[in-house]
Amino acid sequence: METSPLHTILLFKHWAFDSWKKFRLLKVLDGLSVKLISPSCVTYVGELVHLRYLSLTHEPIRKPLRLVSESLYQLHNLQTLIVRILSGVGMQFSKSLPSMYNLHTLSRIKDLKCSKRLLELIPNLKKLGIIYSYEAGWSEHGLDNLVHLHRLEKLSLYAEPYPNLKDDLSQNIAFPLTLNKLSLSGCRFPWEDMRMIGVLLPNLQVLKLKRRACYGTEWETTEGEFCQLKVLLVDSTDLLQWITQSSHFPRLERLTLYECDNLREIPCGFGAHPTLDLIEVDISNSTMVESAECIKEEQESYGNELLQVRLLKSRSWPS
């Protein structure tokens, strides 16, 4: 059988292959737009020994997608694995895992239990995205083991539909110090425990708190927190009072506040903030819009005419 020189395949309709042998040189296989109902469709992917990027969409009927050692685990060059789950109970890993040392990205994985044994198989992971969909205690997910991912740079945790979990995420997670991007959505992380993020993650540059990622009515920051943070997004919160100073975010460049309906103003300390370039606020919150404009005017009085205020009519970032 003649070997195809193709290095990249993008699937838009269906998995129309019963064998991948002629595509042995393939490095990128993007099947994110295709519904994978049966895991048997993945069986032959193990023939693509040079594959570095694999994405697929799984719609389980009864059982979760189980990544078996005779297929995906033969892909020793795989660096990025993205699995989108449409419904059902998600994805599980086989109990007999071979080495996955080359994996750099694991994204959209549903209900993943981060056992120490599993994480030891992916020590070079740089990007991790997990979706939790059932109401159970955070302690059951093993997120305190994330500290063993010594190369992790980006972490996204999404809980749906904003569950009323039995315990706090802050008491059941240990963030790797290497993180520079953190995104939480629906996790109901206590504002009062945000210090563990602000102080204990010295390299954090991007923090996105989406759709009730945090709960509580007051957030008070202190000196020495968020020393490297450049981007802060707060989307949908019950926050009533934000007590902070510009010196608590010494490198902040972009501030986005959306659907913070109970928050009436941006802390006045940002009026003298030397690095702030952009403030984005929900156009429907008139008092927040007025607060942002006042900060812009104060910045201009200090000679800084670079600060821009952008009014948002809708979310302009991924959910």
Image (cartoon, rainbow, N blue to C red):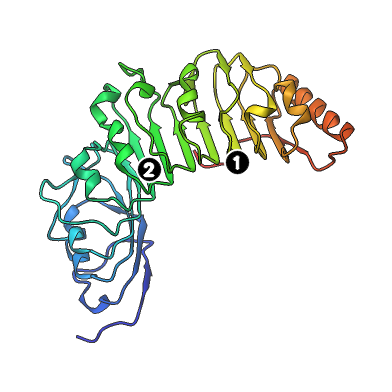
Q: Which residue is mark 1?
A: 316
Label 1: which secondary element = loop
Q: CA distance from mark 2 to mark 1?
A: 20 Å
> Could you tell me which residue is drawn at 35 percent across and 39 percent down?
130
Query: How far across and how far down the image is residue 270, in percent?
Result: 73, 28
Left or right: 309, with 157 as reference point: right
> 95 or 284, which is in the foreground?
95
Could you tell me the amino acid type at mark 1?
Answer: Ser
Q: Residue furthest left?
A: 96
Task: Quadrant for residue 141, please give it.
Answer: top left
Q: Say if 136 sits above or below 14 in the image.
A: above
Taking the image as drawn, is residue 59 in sight?
yes
Instruction: Please tell me which of labels 2 and 1 falls first in the chain.
Output: 2
> Could you tell me which residue is drawn at 54 percent across and 40 percent down?
206
Left or right: 287, with 6 as reference point: right
Left or right: 74, with 149 as reference point: left
- Category of crowding for the residue at label 1, using alpha-carbon neighbours closer than 10 angstroms: few (below 14), some (14–19), many (at least 20): few
Q: Are marks 2 and 1 in contact (CB under 8 Å)?
A: no
> Could you tell me which residue is drawn at 74 percent across and 32 percent down?
273
Query: How far across and how far down the image is residue 148, in percent?
Result: 30, 41
Query: How far across and how far down the image is residue 83, in percent?
Result: 32, 49
> 296 or 236, which is in the foreground?
296
Residue 129's disc is 2
Could you tell me the amino acid type at mark 2?
Answer: Gly
> 247 or 215, which is in the foreground?
247
